[in-house]
Amino acid sequence: MDTMGVGIIGCGMISGNHFHALSKLSHVSLRAVCDIDEEKLEKAAKEQHAQGYTSWRELIARSDIDSVHICVPHYLHAEIAIAALGAGKHVLCEKPMGVSLAEAQAMEAAARDAGKTLTVCFQNRYNGASQRMKEVIEEGTLGKLLGGSAFVAWNRAEPYYVNSPWRGRWETEGGSVLINQAIHTLDLLRFLAGDLKLAACTMSAKRLAETIETEDTCDMLLQGPDGERYLFYASNCGVSNLPVQMHLTFEKGEMHLHGALLTIKGPEGTVTEDYTTALAVGKDYWGSGHGPFIEDFYRRLLAGDPPYITPADGRETTRLMEEAYTQAMTVRRRPT
Ligand SMILES: NC(=O)c1ccc[n+]([C@@H]2O[C@H](COP(=O)([O-])OP(=O)(O)OC[C@H]3O[C@@H](n4cnc5c(N)ncnc54)[C@H](O)[C@@H]3O)[C@@H](O)[C@H]2O)c1
């Protein structure tokens, strides 16, 4: 079997998860890394035994690179993905799939035109608990899904934004808590509940208004394909990074996710299953999904199969977010 050559563009916080996942794979060889920050680039090139580039255009021009991982700020995802696909590379893009629906659609079209694979890093779909929830829904033992709720309370303080100034800016991050942190939970809800429509949304900056121009808190009312009702709340104003919670209510039972703990209540009784896995690298709130996601991406590529997370998945999550950012209401006040 041939070895696939890989390049990673962006050697910041998340790149370690990609380096670690690739180091476990045979038939895949990390050949090049890129960053405009020379210190980060030098460190990554040395540690990964890869050629370093300050220009991603030079990296994607290499003929022995078959795929690239895009790990740069959000506003660069579409430009780099479209150029890389056009240069004949497969692309694994960190979330989000662009900062707008138009960008996501352009990325999808570029993959189609090039006949190359494009996927988006929604690694939480690979969590044991996520897979189990999907299985229970598909088995239908709990009956019809009626609706539910999702809750993300994390903590992102000033240094997080000051140290990476692309964050907290509409132009470069495209938003904050929704597009960066809660995007995983929104995508997971779509994965489980089917296509969702936005009914209403409120966004605000409750704690970081002096630091960021974007939102640190977002709540939404969403509607499932048959009118199911979902409440979604996300904030970066938490004291710590609480486990993500999701509750799904069915005709004949319910499922409650608390981090990696899944409680299923059905006609046969209640069981709690623990899907905790040891964290190999990175922050605990990123989970351990990068490994299985990246492994599966290459397994499918080498087998000639389409990716598990398709461009359409990325595009539809971006569509929902764009609607939320466009329609977000300001908070109502009681007249004094
Ligand atoms: N899947 C997850 O759970 C997860 C978690 C964290 C971050 N992310 C995503 O990963 C991406 C990067 O986030 P991060 O936290 O690592 O950010 P970061 O700021 O730590 O790193 C970004 C890196 O990109 C580099 N860069 C900027 N412009 C560049 C250019 N033109 N060419 C090459 N390199 C350039 C920066 O110098 C920096 O080193 C974002 O899309 C983010 O949303 C995903």
Image (tube, rainbow, N blue to C red):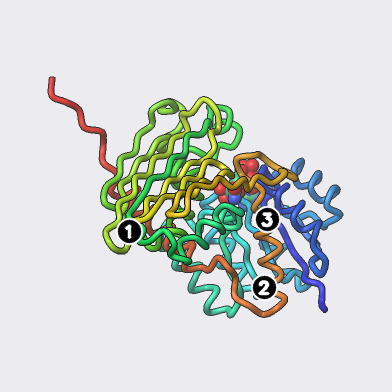
Label 1: how many Cα within 10 Å (few below 14, some 14–19, many 20+): many
User: Mark 1 is on which residue type?
Assistant: Gly
**Earlier residue among tags 3 and 2:** 3
Q: Which mark is in front, 2 or 1?
A: 1
Q: Using the rendered view, name the quadrant where residue 151 is placed.
A: top left
- Check the image and name the residue furthest to the left: 335
Q: Residue 289 appears at what percent x and percent y?
A: 64, 53
Q: Is residue 264 above or below residue 237?
A: below
The quarter of the image holding the C terminus is top left
Q: Nearer the viewer, residue 303 or 39?
A: 303
Residue 170 appears in the rendering: no
Q: Which mark is in front, 3 or 2?
A: 2
Q: How many marks?
A: 3
Q: Nearer the viewer, residue 213 or 306?
A: 306
Label 1: which residue? 224
CA–CA distance in space, label 3 to label 2:
22 Å
The quarter of the image holding the N terminus is bottom right
User: Mark 3 is on which residue type?
Assistant: Ile
Horizontal relation, residue 169 to residue 284: left or right: left
Label 3: how many Cα within 10 Å (few below 14, some 14–19, many 20+): many
User: Mark 2 is on which residue type?
Assistant: Arg
Determine the secondary structure under disc 3: strand
Label 2: how many Cα within 10 Å (few below 14, some 14–19, many 20+): some
Residue at the (44%, 67%) spot, across then down? 105
Label 3: which residue? 9
Q: Is residue 193 above or below residue 3?
A: above
Residue 302 appears in the rendering: yes
Q: Using the rendered view, name the quadrant where residue 308 is placed.
A: bottom right
Q: Residue 211 appears at what percent x and percent y?
A: 47, 28
Residue at the (72%, 71%) spot, across then down? 66
Q: On residue 300, which mark appears? A: 2
